[in-house]
Image (tube, grey):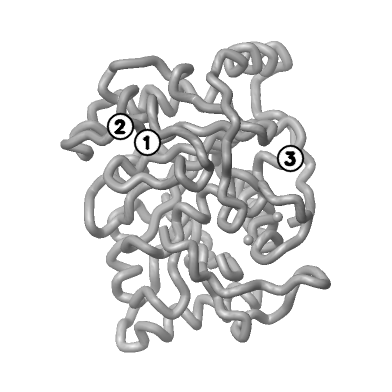
């Protein structure tokens, strides 16, 4: 835990004039997971989170109906689509995965919102790679959702289409199966943001999102949701009410501490699972998890 505490101090120093303690997860303070450069832990034994083998088979049959395609992911930012088992940032995501499974032993945890205080902190990068590292576990079905209806980008990073997607479903134009995409990575599914719409906050809060998430929870073991930044608009807070927890992404040496605290106030205190510190310079890392590869600075992962 020393690395986590040291990392939090580095965040706090950015706003040393501010006083008070950020909101936490109910266990004595906010957890901070460092993500070197923009993070896979020891493989976690996995038992499908469904009521019975019959339910698991039924879910498989339903997901077979989802449209499949040949995604063309950007392997510079979509880390686990590349051929290398180890590489910059991968071990940090493995560590984050392990931490989430530890939390899952204490609380019900399946639907996780990934957000940030302001844009350009790397939340989409964290959401996409967290979903990938979770899906690498045998039998673990993971759904990644781009719920940023204002400035979507996950479909570009994955190299797939933007529609039909979430906006079409929320407008009542299609059902959930039609908007769930499956690509070449086994167990990883994706819902894109859909076509551009106006009145995003009203659409998100029309009640259909809650019904969608409840339905999807029957089919998937983890659901990772990428949302807009918390401070500019209200969307993240609205979406969080449908989720089990929130991970805040902070860009190292960039986001003022008081801005982070203000963003956290948009969510219930017991909803904040922790903080992911993104883009840590090499010199600030205490150690490396593997030989032959070292973390690199984050320059391309701004969302």
Q: Is residue 130 above or below residue 262?
A: above
Residue 137: numbered disc: 3
Q: Quick one: label 1, few (<14), some, or many (20+) residues within 10 Å?
A: many
Q: Nearer the viewer, mark 2 or mark 1?
A: 2
Q: Position of residue 68 (x, y in %)?
A: 57, 23
Tag 1's secondary structure? loop
Tell me the residue at 23%/27% (across/down). Answer: 206
- Label at residue 193: 1
Element class at badge 3: loop
- Mark 3 Cα shell of 10 Å, populated few (<14), some (14-19), many (≥20): some
Say whether disc 2 or disc 3 marks the residue closer to the N-terminus: 3
First along the sequence among labels 1 and 3: 3
- Say which residue label 2 marks: 195
Query: Residue 272: x and y, percent?
Result: 43, 55
> Can residue 81 be seen at all in this image of the molecule?
yes
Quote the CA–CA distance across marks 2 and 1.
7 Å
* Crowdedness near tag 2: few (<14), some (14–19) or many (≥20) residues, C-alpha within 10 Å: some
Q: CA distance from mark 1 to mark 3?
A: 26 Å
User: In the image, is residue 21 above or below residue 30?
Assistant: below
Q: Nearer the viewer, residue 303 or 205?
A: 303
Which mark's residue is nearer the viewer, 1 or 3? 1
The relative height of residue 54 versus residue 47 in the rendered view (above or below) is above
How far separated are the C-alphas under marks 2 and 3? Answer: 32 Å
């Amino acid at each position: 835990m020393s690395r986590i505490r040291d990392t939090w101090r580095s965040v706090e120093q950015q706003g040393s004039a501010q006083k008070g303690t950020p909101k936490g997860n109910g266990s004595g303070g906010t957890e901070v997971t460092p993500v070197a450069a923009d993070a896979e832990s020891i493989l976690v034994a996995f038992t499908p989170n469904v009521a019975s083998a019959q339910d698991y088979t039924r879910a498989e049959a339903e997901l077979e109906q989802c449209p499949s395609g040949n995604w063309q992911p950007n392997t510079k930012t979509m880390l686990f689509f590349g051929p290398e088992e180890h590489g910059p940032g991968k071990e940090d995501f493995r560590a984050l995965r392990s931490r989430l499974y530890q939390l899952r032993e204490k609380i019900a945890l399946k639907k996780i919102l990934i957000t940030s205080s302001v844009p350009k902190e790397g939340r989409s990068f964290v959401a996409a790679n967290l979903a990938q590292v979770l899906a690498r576990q045998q039998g673990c079905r993971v759904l990644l959702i781009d719920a940023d209806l204002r400035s979507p980008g996950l479909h570009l990073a994955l190299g797939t289409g933007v529609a039909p997607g979430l906006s079409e479903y929320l407008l009542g134009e299609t059902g959930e199966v039609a908007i769930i995409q499956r690509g070449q990575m086994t167990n990883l599914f994706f819902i894109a943001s859909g076509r551009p719409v106006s009145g995003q906050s009203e659409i998100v809060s029309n009640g259909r999102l809650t019904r969608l998430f409840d339905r999807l929870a029957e089919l998937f073991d983890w659901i990772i949701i990428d949302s807009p930044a918390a401070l500019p608009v209200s969307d993240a807070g609205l979406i969080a009410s449908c989720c089990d927890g929130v991970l805040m992404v902070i860009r190292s040496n960039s986001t003022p501490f008081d801005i982070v605290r203000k963003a956290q106030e948009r969510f219930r205190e017991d909803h904040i699972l922790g903080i992911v510190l993104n883009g840590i310079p090499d010199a600030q890392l205490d150690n490396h998890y593997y030989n032959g590869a070292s973390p690199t600075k984050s320059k391309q992962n701004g969302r």
